[in-house]
Structures are given as C-alpha cells and as structure tokens.
Amino acid sequence: MKILADDIGDIIGKITPPGGIGGGDNPQAGISNFISLGIQIFIIVCVIALLIYMLWGAFDWIISGGEKEKITKAQQKITNAVIGFIVVFAVITVFNLIINNVLHLNVFQLVK
C-alpha cells in the first residue's frame, strides 16, 4: 500500500514553520526588528548610566564646600559624562551608516 503526501498531512496535520522575529515571512525585517530592539535597549541603558554619573558629579560639586580638589573631581565627572554622551552618539551614527549602507537593513524604526 502506497501512502501519499496528502494522506500523511491528514494523519499528522500540517506543520508550518515559525515566522521571523516580528517580520512575518520576511527574515530581513525580522533581523532589522531584532537589531532595532537591541539598539533601543543599549541607548536607554547608556543614557540612564550617563545621567546618573552626571548627577553624581553635580552632587559632588554641591557638597564640595569650596575645596578646589573636590570641585576639580566633580567637574571631571561631569566632563566625562558629556564625553560619554558624545561617544555613544558617534557609535550609534557609525553603526547606522554601516548597517544601512553595507547590509541594507533599516534598524532605526519602531519595533512593531
């Protein structure tokens, strides 16, 4: 007795592969959504860390009591936080240029 493919489908049911990561049947959209989510998490974590570091420097400046050495350390913390903001912005800009121009992915979009 010969079993046909339709008979097997009736016996075990139809198996459909899972869709992409938020991209439906388009794997490129799924990868773009996945990378976009990772970038959004990275930006949020960096901004929170940099704001905390900047506020720490401002707090140190307030409680320095006019001591030159403490004020200098507080100013250095604030300067490092601003430099950190600039570095994060530059890294995201370079990453966006590489992803868009080399891999042709549009990752800076809202995750759907």
Image (cartoon, helix red, strand yellow):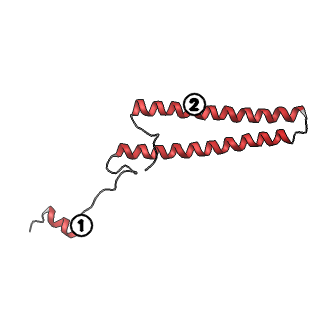
- Residue 20: x and y, percent? 36, 51
Give 65 or 49, whichever is nearer the viewer. 65
- Residue 42: x and y, percent? 56, 43
In this rendering, position of residue 88 left or right of residue 25: right
Give 1 or 36, whichever is nearer the viewer. 36
- Residue 40: x and y, percent? 53, 44
At a point 48% along the width and 33% down the height, the residue shown is: 96
Give 4 or 29, whichever is nearer the viewer. 29
At a point 71% along the width and 44% down the height, the residue shown is: 52
Tell which tag, 1 or 2, sits nearer the viewer: 2
Report the number of discs. Answer: 2
In this rendering, position of residue 65 left or right of residue 89: right
At a point 18% along the width and 66% down the height, the residue shown is: 8
Helix, strand or loop at label 1? It is loop
- Residue 104: x and y, percent? 38, 34
Q: Pointer 1 and pointer 2: residues touching (CB < 8 Å)?
A: no
Q: Earlier in the sequence, mark 1 or mark 2?
A: 1
Q: Residue 76's quadrant in the figure?
A: top right
Q: CA distance from mark 1 to mark 2?
A: 52 Å
Helix, strand or loop at label 2? It is helix
For disc 2, the neighbor class at 10 Å (few under 14, some 14 to 19, many from 20) is few
> What is the quadrant of the N terminus in the image?
bottom left
Q: Residue 74's quadrant in the figure?
A: top right
Residue 11's place in the image compared with 54, above or below, is below
Q: Which mark is residue 95?
A: none
Residue pointed to by mark 2: 90
Residue found farthest to the left: 1
For disc 1, the neighbor class at 10 Å (few under 14, some 14 to 19, many from 20) is few
Q: Amino acid at mark 1?
A: Gly
In this rendering, position of residue 57 left or right of residue 2: right
Q: Amino acid at mark 2?
A: Ala
Residue pointed to by mark 1: 13
